[in-house]
Image (cartoon, rainbow, N blue to C red):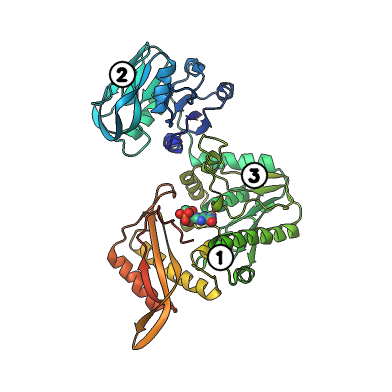
Amino acid sequence: LMIVIDFGGQYNQLVARRVRENQVYCEIYSYKTDIEKIKAMHPKGIILTGGPDSCYVEGAATYSKELFNLGIPVLGLCYGAQLMQHLLGGKVERADFREYGKTNVHFDTTSPLFKDLKEDSVVWMSHFDYISQLGPNFKSIAHSENCPVAAFESTDDRQLYGIQFHPEVLHTEQGTEMIRNFVVNVCHFSQDWIMANFVDEQIKAIREKVGDGKVLCALSGGVDSSVAAVLLSKAVGKQLTCVFVDHGLLRKNEGDEVEAVFGPEGPYDLNFIRVDAASRYYEKLKGVTEPERKRKIIGEEFIRVFEEEAKKIGAVDFLVQGTIYPDVVESGLGGESAVIKSHHNVGGLPDYVDFKEIVEPLRNLFKDEVRKVGLELGIPEYLVFRQPFPGPGLGIRIIGEVTPEKVRIVQDADAIYREEIAKAGLDRSIGQYFAALTNMRSVGVMGDERTYDYAIALRAVNTIDFMTAEAANIPFDVLSTVMSRIINEVRGVNRVMYDITSKPPGTIEFE
Ligand code: XMP
């Protein structure tokens, strides 16, 4: 186990992901975690992350000095490196110039941290403070023009290392190699964190936990719930019941696709219940135009439908949740950052489903690892690589009132858009893309006739974390093809627009 101690920097999850790319399991803990707890986990290596503080300021995030005497290799990154020096006799000061962005650095490649690297390369710097003097028994192993200590190591046998820049971000050339060097050359991990092992271990663990209990899963057809359901099915077979609520706001044919995989004709051993609740939803949404009201109605109705089904099934022992590691870290249970994206959950846990305990088989995985597990389990690629689809579905991709007619229009337009994007080979490179139905109608001409129809908006964004995004630069001829197909094939549309707004100021969805 590698432990990442989180000081509140913006790249903390990235650090953990980069470690795991080396087939080494890694968990994130806040700097507020007691050292006894860290010791009890017997980590083979520790990484201290960056953070927003200045370590010499009263009340700044800090850690027990004992951490550096455990005989465990420690690597400090940015703030982590400064803090290590601050605690071990070095000096950290405010620099005259803030170093920010791509910077040339010269490396001492005799250090195990920089073994087999080029001596000069570009790194990503972002700091106000710098290490002006190293503590006893440390030496500098990298420098830039303005930064005499861009990296350091201990000269005795403590195996302490620090890096002022950010090897975890891709702007740092050779950053991947530096992290690998720490993991392999310094900590000597055995690199056996692979998803095939994870699957075997999880299946065993689930069997132990569940015994002969009954398990209930709300299946959305999204990546996380699909992978969780298949793991459970492999572990306990028909003890698992999946309830799939089709709210009539899914993409074209999606309900049938989910049923084809998880239903009785599919390859998995489980009980599958599909609830066709479309008309209930349409009824509830009649006349409602306000986006937040729509979200709320869709979320509440989901819980109601799910609960009704759960009541028919009766008491169960376990409820499956598709929680993944970023949810754990972001809700403050793991790391330091405490952002909770409440609007991204369909509506929380159903209140009175009768269950004893929650099972969260994906709780320790990042999204890319969930996908690997999905492939490992033989789940079809179109499910595994599905793009994010919001809980309220097309309900928030139809501006204004939702009607069955508008749902049909946006489904058909979106299906054409996705088909053409895939044909152009862009489906894996664009972060998220979809068609939405604007509530605008305008005059057009088709054949010799005047039309007065809806405008479809096409959206495609590239994003790292969905918090910010930029419109994707789709080739114009691809857009043209999509436009003419939508106009020709989808009744009720006479205009197609491409949304070039970034986020901010726009959001990714329209509502
Ligand atoms: P926005 O529109 O906030 O979207 O820029 C960011 C990401 O979140 C998804 N999204 C949602 N997901 N329930 C969800 O489960 C929601 O209510 C919701 N709203 C937005 C959106 O698809 C994008 O990936």
The quarter of the picture where residue 74 lies is top left
Q: Position of residue 327 (x, y in %)?
A: 54, 43
Q: Position of residue 197 (x, y in %)?
A: 52, 39
Whether residue 268 is visible: yes
| Mark 2 lies on residue | 140
Q: Position of residue 498 (x, y in %)?
A: 35, 65
Q: Nearer the viewer, residue 6 or 193?
A: 6
Residue 78, relative to residue 256: is it above or below? above
Q: Nearer the viewer, residue 313 or 3?
A: 3
| Mark 3 lies on residue | 359
**Residue at screen point 37% across, 13% down:** 135
Label 2: few (<14), some (14–19) or many (≥20) C-alpha neighbours in 10 Å: many
| Mark 1 lies on residue | 255
Q: Is mark 1 within 8 Å of ligand 1?
A: no
**Residue at screen point 59% across, 43% down:** 361
| Residue 398 appears left or right of 232 | left
